Amino acid sequence: MKLLSWNCRGLNDPHTPKIPYIVWLCRTKTPTLLFLCETKMNVDDVASRLGILNPSYLFGCNADGSKGGLAVLGWTNDRVICIHASKHVIVCNILGRNGNSKHVLFVYGEPKVENRVHVWEILSSFLDRFPNCILIGDFNQLETQDDKLGGSTTIRGANDLINWRMRNNVFEVPFSGPKFTWSNKSLGESLIMERLDRAYVTNSWFDDFPEGRLRNEPITISDHAAILYDSSPLVRFTKRPYQLENWCLNFEEVRRVIESNWNTGGSGSSMFKVRRNLQYIRTTLQNWCLSNKSFWGINWREENSKLFHKALEISNLDQGSMYIENLHNWVPTCTLKFKYWQQRMKEKWIREGDCNTPMMYRRVKCRRSRSEITSIKDKEDVWVEGQDQVAKVIMESLLDVFNPIVDNNLNEEIDLTLRQLALPCLSSGDKDALDKEFSEIEIKEAMLSIHSSKSPGLDGVTAEFFSL
């Protein structure tokens, strides 16, 4: 399970690059649930603004004018029920396909310190009812001076938070990444940076997910950073080979590379030459495609990586000021790129064929999280969870199917049954037709009949490549 939380500080500006940033986060982090606080919008408006993500679930709490506003979006085959939604807490019950039930409390802490005790009381009431749960979000409260850089050395409200934790026996999820998740974005001695966004779990949750970890993203276009909780961070996913995509085939530069490098000579069979040419062209074009590819006008992967490593180095006010100064220069450029894309989307993207193709929508709908098998029944009819255990059950099932233990007497019975069916036999003409070599016309017709945007095979290219 992956839980993504971000205090976005408003989604009501149509020219803000926050929407494409959220899309990029969802596409790369593939969260099960996404929590957005301070949307400053009604839930229906958030649904309209983020409809491109095609969530399975969406609920929340409307903003009070230009203040607050919470939204939760989900992509999962499990059943998610919103059992409480207020301006500070959204409580979700997740019913797994294996019958397990757990709860997620998305928290937006009270900005005014004198009112925070009320929030802790609300959370305590839910913890009494739901012992197996996780709390994640913007708590708006520090615990120790180590979580703060700059500003006053006095931490108001810390004792109330610590007392709440001790009383409810919850403990904080370890994190990695940049230490500070909020900044006032001032420079010099006025700079303040704090770790306000975090996650806590109960003992029951920890027993189920002992390896759960939190990853802090860098602060970007909001004064808060996004945080991602992963219940199984040590799960290893295989990295597939790079595959050429149809969008790049529309550029004349790419066509010239293909034409000039296709027949490079050499010895070997015809299929060996085709395979070698494909490997060479894919390697040659890989760098070009990656450098010319943009996500809604902004290369979020590259920008986020740069900011992430710079944020890791922050340990004093000078380093923090340098980071914030870099943000002040970066955010206007980021916004300008987004506006440029907005103005040219219909004209350029439709002309290049990328706006309404299945490829684009596949990339932004977080399909991976929706198709992932998180639990399965084994041959003993017992539910198992975890990638390793699920993979083991599937492998054992395939071995049983393709390597069955067959009794020799059963083979004789099968042969007898087939003879009794009097099935028709191939004529000598049919056999000759099947043995005949394929003609160039048949091969061409078969290749060009494949849908141009179907997933590529092991060679890493789609059928559209061969129609050039």
Image: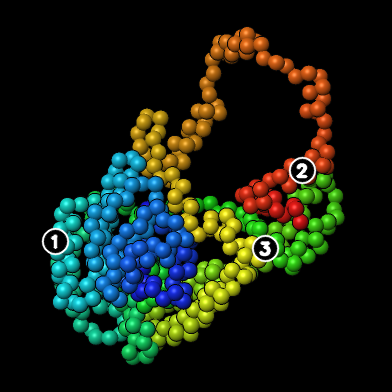
The amino acid on which the numbered mark 3 sits, given as a three-letter code, is: Cys
Disc 3 target residue:
248
Q: Quadrant of residue 413?
A: top right
Of the two numbered discs 1 and 3 on the same chain, state the one appearing first in sequence: 1
Q: Which label lies toward us, 2 or 1? A: 2
Q: Which mark is residue 167?
A: 1
Other residues around mark 3 within 10 Å, as few (<14) / some (14–19) / many (≥20)? some
For the residues labelled 1 and 3, the Cα–Cα distance comes to 58 Å
What residue would you read off at disc 2? Answer: 445
Q: CA distance from mark 3 to mark 2?
A: 24 Å
Q: Mark 3 or mark 2: name the one nearer the start of the chain.
A: 3
In the rendered image, the vertical position of residue 190 relative to residue 415, given as above or below: below
Marks 3 and 2 close (CB-CB < 8 Å):
no
| Badge nearest the viewer, 1 or 3 | 3
Residue kind at label 2, given as amino acid type = Glu
Mark 2 secondary-structure assignment = helix
Gap between marks 2 and 1 measured at Cα: 72 Å
Kind of residue indicated by mark 1: Arg
Residue drawn at x 71%, y 66% is 251
Q: Which image quarter: residue 383?
A: top left
